Every structure is written in C-alpha cells, then in structure tokens.
Image (cartoon, rainbow, N blue to C red):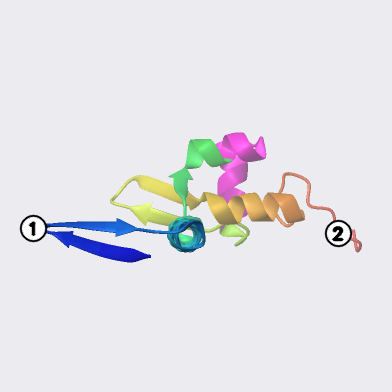
Amino acid sequence: MYTQLTGSQRLVVFDFDDLLKIVQEVVSDVVEKREAKIKEASSVPEWGTVDAACRMLHVSKPTFYSMVSKGSIETRKVGMRRTLVNLHKLREGIETGAIGRYKHTNGR
C-alpha cells in the first residue's frame, strides 16, 4: 500500500492482499453485529394474545385458563382486561411436551 498526496486529495493504492484483509475485516464486523442483533432479538420475549395461544394449543379459552391456573402457562395482565402470553415459552413447552391438551403422565 502506498499513499500519494496531491493538493487536498489523497490517493491510496492497495495491493490485492491488503485489500482482501480489509474486506474480510469489514465483512467479519458486519456478520458479528448481525448475529448480535439476532441473538438479542431472540432473547426478548414475544408476547401474544390469548386467542393466538388457544389456536397454537388447539384448545378453548376455558381450557386455556385452566392451564394458566395450574401454572403451565405464563401470562401477564396489561391494563384491566388484556392478558398476554409469552409465546416463546409456550412454543418451547409445546415442543418438549410440557404443555398440551393431553399431557400424559405415568401414574394415571
């Protein structure tokens, strides 16, 4: 790499290896920032409505509220009437089998 000054302008010339290193560093920085944003977004809880949770579980509202009272599902009250559900934890529970319409146990 060499730099040539001409008045108020600067001309910088890179050889291929120097340019390749610069591009790799820039791309690496961009990828790291993108991955950090994705990780941050996935750690933020996603909250949804009771209706959305009932559709995910294929249950009625009374059955859903029964599951909430048993402590199977996390909810938050917003204002006087609105109830929100942590959809991330709900999906995890469904995938692991901890939450569902028919939760089977060995000691029937």
Q: Position of residue 94 (x, y in %)?
A: 70, 49
Which quadrant of the view contains residue 105? bottom right
Crowding at mark 1 (Cα within 10 Å: few <14, some 14-19, many 20+): few
- At 27% from the left and 64% from the top, the residue drawn is 3
Q: Nearer the viewer, residue 24 or 73?
A: 24
Mark carried by residue 8: 1
Compared across the picture, whether 46 is left or right of 73 comes to: left
Crowding at mark 2 (Cα within 10 Å: few <14, some 14-19, many 20+): few
Q: Main secondary structure of the magenta part?
A: helix
Q: Position of residue 49 (x, y in %)?
A: 45, 41
In the image, the segment drawn in magenta is 54-68
Q: Nearer the viewer, residue 95 or 100?
A: 95
Residue 82 seen in the figure: yes
Mark carried by residue 68: none
Q: Position of residue 72 (x, y in %)?
A: 63, 59
Q: Farthest left residue?
A: 7
Secondary structure category for the residue under label 2: loop
Q: Which residue is mark 2?
A: 105
The tag earlier along the polypeptide, 2 or 1, is 1
